[in-house]
Amino acid sequence: MYHDSPTKTLHSPLLKMPPSMQDNYPSTPGKVKVERSNYFGRVASRWHTTASARLLACTAILLALTLCVFFRMSGTSRVGGEGDIVGRSMAVFKPTHQWELKVRQSCLPKRENDAMVVLVTGAAGFVGTHVSLALKKRGDGVVGLDNFNDYYETSLKRARQDVLQKHGVFVVEGDINNEALLKTLFELGQFTHVMHLAAQAGVRYAMQNPGSYVHSNIAGLVNLFEVCKAANPQPAIVWASSSSVYGLNTKVPFSESDRTDQPASLYAATKKAGEEIAHTYNHIYGLSITGLRFFTVYGPWGRPDMAYFSFTRDILRGKAINIYTGHGGKDLARDFTYIDDIVKGCVGSLDTAEKSTGSGGKKTGPAQLRVFNLGNTSPVTVPSLVDILEKYLKVKAKRNIIKMPRNGDVPFTHANISAAQNQLNYHPTTNLDTGLKKFVKWYQSYYGVGTNHRLWLGDQEQIV
Ligand SMILES: O=C(O)[C@H]1O[C@H](OP(=O)(O)OP(=O)(O)OC[C@H]2O[C@@H](n3ccc(=O)[nH]c3=O)[C@H](O)[C@@H]2O)[C@H](O)[C@@H](O)[C@H]1O
């Protein structure tokens, strides 16, 4: 597979760093294997003068690659410590009886009519946790999958996992690139639906770690589609695309039929690529696929890398926040969308998804292929977002107003949601003020100083 080839990511900025610095980056699978293998390659190139040195270098590279692959696999493809995986796509996966039991129990629906059995990828993520809970609460069978990578604090992901476990959702620890694991899950779960939310998120981080976007948003997506296409019966798939596919478009509000061929970030480009890949799997194999273009989702249990979350953290610590401005000093604006509204859109998509038409890799007829905007339809500027945070945090922010760096950001987003309104019965009801009030309440209860609360100190976390 792509991520196994050390030659494809030669332009990664990480390659310019010494290995010690590379360790500061999250352990997303795209990174370590590629960087280390190229590091050994560069060492080897200094030894090219003699044939024996060349032989030695080759042996060292092979050994290093083997070790990298071995350690990488054992580090990222664990299955809750209860299964045993060797290798990735060609893995031998030996689940324990107890692990199988947990998967089966988690998949059991608690309602009679029209119950679904859903695999939720990225279940320990922000949206994944909320969607898994909503499905479980209404009686669907749900099993989660998450690789618990350290793009942001893993303790938050573990805390979400605890919440899910309390509600009877088992989250398997593993990567969507692990074909053997996915196949085993499909055999056990006989999923009717897949809610695919696992991804490398974040618009600006794509400049630091491009390989992680290719690994999760492209290679991982293809691997998942491959397993879904071969499954019998094939599940219907709903997956997270992004508002960022509208890129540098200036026509507002953004409609699904607008052009999406000028992405401003690699993140956006991988999501756009995902939409094209979805078309292919729908066309060839009859997979029913619905892509959801999320617009800057926020709320309780959210993502610490996002502005509303990091601003909250910094305002409370008395640290200055950078507020970007666009061309001519214009405020940036986002169609911020509250998590509960997004959950309704996800569940509505699952409920209206038609069955896939293929079976065992063969298409028997045309299948449903949809794309929807899930936004709020009322963009708010970033300074106004900060005003609201100040109100609920009761602390004045120290504002640095700076020109938007060239980092993949777009100046504004604004969703036209009429398609989702008509077809998914999607009607967002939470405005930014109400949503941020709920977020601040959650933030203070989660991180607030007191018994058993977590205090985030920037690069480390303390239980106080
Ligand atoms: O809709 C999406 O598809 C994406 O939404 C989200 O991206 P964005 O809309 O960029 O959200 P977010 O980072 O919260 O920045 C919000 C605003 O604050 C500005 N911003 C940001 C940081 C900062 O320090 N200062 C600042 O002004 C910044 O310039 C921007 O104007 C998801 O992260 C992404 O994964 C994807 O899902």
Image (spheres, rainbow, N blue to C red):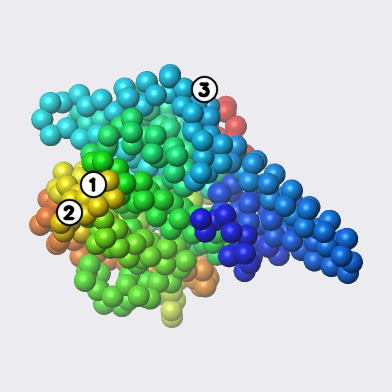
Side of 299 where 352 appears, left or right: left
- Residue 90 appears in the rendering: yes
Location of residue 417 with respect to 79 vertically, above or below? below
Residue at 23 percent across and 46 percent down: it is: 359
Question: Mark 1 touching mark 2, by CB under 8 A?
Answer: yes
Whichever of callouts 2 and 3 sits on the residue coming sooner in the sequence is 2
Q: Amino acid at mark 2?
A: Thr
Q: Amino acid at mark 3?
A: Thr
Q: Amino acid at mark 1?
A: Ser
Residue at 31 percent across and 78 percent down: it is: 250
Q: The C terminus lies in which quarter of the figure?
A: top right
Q: Residue 406: percent from the left, percent from the top?
A: 52, 73
Q: Residue 246: percent from the left, percent from the top?
A: 33, 70
Q: Which residue is mark 1?
A: 359
Q: Nearer the viewer, mark 3 or mark 1?
A: 1
Q: Quadrant of ligand 1?
A: bottom left
- Determine whether the residue tagged by mark 3 lies in a helix, strand or loop: loop
Whichever of callouts 3 and 1 sits on the residue coming sooner in the sequence is 1
Q: Which mark is residue 451?
A: 3
Q: Residue 274: percent from the left, percent from the top?
A: 36, 61
Q: Residue 431: percent from the left, percent from the top?
A: 25, 52
- Residue 149 appears in the rendering: no
Q: Which mark is residue 364?
A: 2
8 or 155: nearer the viewer: 8
Residue at 39 percent across and 24 percent down: it is: 100
Q: Residue furthest bottom?
A: 328
Whichever of callouts 1 and 2 sits on the residue coming sooner in the sequence is 1
